[in-house]
């Protein structure tokens, strides 16, 4: 997310390097570049104007004249203004009410509401220990109810089954009554996708809203929607008095304009980011961290939190003890590391949170998520002895492993080469060699990193 915006804003800030101070003359072109970067990222025009005006005023103010590095100060100004545009950190859902707390999801067609409903249910169950009921009032889209029922079973939450011929208002009322009788803490009501210009469908969602009086009315918006997201956000906010926003498909958006526009238009906090297709791919929205990612500073705090939540600490400690005692890093260990990365959303999600300087140029765009699955399949096709002692894998064994995992012999060779590089790295970790290893990398990621990080070309 934000790839293009990050690149353009970085270029704008670079133009100020070497300047002794910021003046009206040298700031004008830089602000113009910032304006163009935001417009190209599909940020709403009123937001762009307010943002660049604020940046210009602050850049020419006293706070910058006292700085020894005006270029760095300008980056900080952009960071602070990005945070201001995206709003204060969301306090999360309001769960301090008599159960069941009713959460209504609304948005445009194709925004990802049904998947988001399941992600939110999982978040509430795992993070807040809530008993959640999922209900769908989407009687228009074929298999919409079946989809939510299937997702509900995946996230271990109850689904309220209803006849598709039943009016949406009645389904919503029955679901809330069921949640009340069966002592659910939260009931999430998924609504049909609708165009904000469809008066009849907008009237329907207002009727559902009046019937169940939700405590939370969340607008689910595709972060790739651009200017459409702004118009839709305004219309839904007028219809429902929204309490918050969830941005979906944030992992695939290279522009990010919706994140900078929706908060300004609705005045409502962005609560969550959908960062993948899996039900665990939902992150709380932190403006400061997102602003850092936009400026190429990475989001190490979120990465650390994700590692603590997703990485099997017992296995990590076991591997650490193994390496400390001098026992070798083998292919079983590599497979476990690959699976840990998958649990964290894949290598691309990991790289997205790293500072730009640690990632080779254009490396993120060259990462193939299927590569990691292929590597795990290759290791699964090996015998326990081959995993422990890769050196015994000769030509005939490679052909057998390739056939068993459905890949080419070249893929097996590539994995073994990457493993050899990792094994050398792991040996350097023994005896306090971490600093030496980092010096050797020189701020670059190794070409043989799990998941097949490509070398810069």
Image (tube, helix red, strand yellow):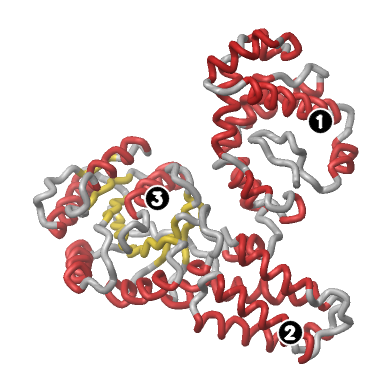
What residue is rendered at 72% in x and 53% in y? 361
The residue at the far bottom in this view is: 24
Disc 3 versus disc 1: distance between alpha carbons?
39 Å
The quarter of the displayed image where residue 374 is located: top right
The quarter of the displayed image where residue 299 is located: bottom right
**Of label 3 and label 1, which has the lower sequence position?**
3
Is 53 left or right of 358, judged from the image as shown? left
What residue is rendered at 81% in x and 23% in y? 324
Residue 452, horizontal then vertical, whole percent: 66, 36
- Of residues 160 and 408, the one nearer the viewer is 408
What residue is rendered at 67% in x and 23% in y? 333
**Of label 2 and label 3, which has the lower sequence position?**
2
Residue 176, horizontal then vertical, whole percent: 21, 53
Is 89 left or right of 388, judged from the image as shown? left
What residue is rendered at 18% in x and 66% in y? 204
Mark 2 lies on residue: 59
Mark 3 lies on residue: 120
Which label sits in the foreground, 3 or 1? Answer: 1
Disc 2 versus disc 3: distance between alpha carbons?
40 Å
Q: Are marks 3 and 1 in contact (CB under 8 Å)?
A: no
Looking at the rendered image, the quarter that the N terminus falls into is bottom right
Q: Residues within 10 Å of mark 3 (few under 14, many from 20)?
A: many
Q: Are marks 1 and 2 in contact (CB under 8 Å)?
A: no
Residue 59, horizontal then vertical, whole percent: 73, 84
The residue at the far left in this view is: 165
> Which numbered circle lies on residue 425?
1
**Of label 1 and label 2, which has the lower sequence position?**
2
Q: Secondary structure at mark 1?
A: helix
């Amino acid at each position: 997310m934000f790839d293009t915006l990050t690149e353009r804003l970085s270029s704008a800030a670079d133009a100020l390097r070497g300047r002794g101070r910021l003046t009206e003359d040298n700031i004008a072109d830089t602000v113009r570049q910032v304006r163009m970067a935001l417009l190209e990222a599909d940020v709403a025009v009123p937001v762009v104007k307010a943002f660049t005006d604020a940046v210009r005023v602050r850049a020419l103010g006293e706070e910058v004249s006292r700085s020894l590095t005006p270029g760095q100060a300008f980056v900080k100004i952009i960071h602070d203004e990005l945070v201001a545009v995206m709003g204060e950190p969301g306090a999360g859902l309001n769960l301090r009410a008599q159960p069941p707390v009713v959460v209504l999801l609304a948005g445009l067609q194709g925004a990802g509401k049904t998947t988001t409903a399941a992600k939110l249910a999982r978040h509430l169950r795992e993070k807040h220990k809530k008993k959640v009921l999922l209900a769908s009032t989407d009687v228009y889209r074929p298999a919409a109810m079946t989809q939510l029922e299937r997702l509900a079973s995946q996230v271990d939450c109850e689904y309220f089954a209803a006849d598709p011929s039943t009016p949406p208002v009645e389904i919503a009322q029955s679901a809330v009554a069921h949640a009340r009788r069966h002592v659910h803490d939260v009931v999430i009501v998924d609504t049909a996708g609708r165009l904000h210009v469809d008066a009849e469908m907008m009237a329907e969602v207002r009727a559902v809203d009046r019937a169940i009086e939700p405590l939370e009315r969340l607008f689910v918006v595709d972060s790739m929607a651009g200017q459409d997201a702004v118009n839709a956000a305004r219309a839904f906010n007028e219809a429902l008095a929204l309490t918050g926003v969830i941005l979906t498909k944030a992992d695939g958006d290279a522009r990010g304009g919706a994140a900078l526009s929706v908060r300004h238009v609705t005045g409502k906090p962005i609560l969550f980011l959908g960062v993948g297709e899996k039900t665990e791919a939902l992150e709380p929205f932190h403006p400061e961290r997102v602003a850092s990612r936009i400026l190429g500073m990475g989001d190490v705090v979120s990465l650390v939190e994700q590692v603590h939540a997703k990485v099997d600490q017992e296995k990590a400690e076991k591997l650490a003890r193994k390496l400390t005692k001098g026992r070798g890093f083998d292919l079983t260990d590599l497979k476990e590391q690959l699976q840990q990365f998958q649990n964290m959303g894949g290598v691309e999600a990991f790289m997205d949170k790293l500072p730009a300087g640690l990632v080779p140029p254009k490396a993120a765009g060259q990462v193939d998520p299927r590569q990691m699955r292929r590597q795990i399949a290759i290791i699964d096709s090996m015998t326990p002895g081959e995993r422990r002692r890769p050196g015994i894998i000769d030509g005939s064994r490679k052909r057998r492993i390739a056939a068993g995992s459905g890949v080419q012999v070249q893929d097996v060779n590539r994995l073994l080469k990457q493993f050899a590089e990792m094994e050398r790295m792991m040996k350097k970790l023994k005896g306090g060699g971490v600093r030496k290893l980092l010096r050797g990398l020189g701020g670059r990621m190794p070409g043989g990193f799990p998941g097949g990080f490509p070398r810069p070309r």
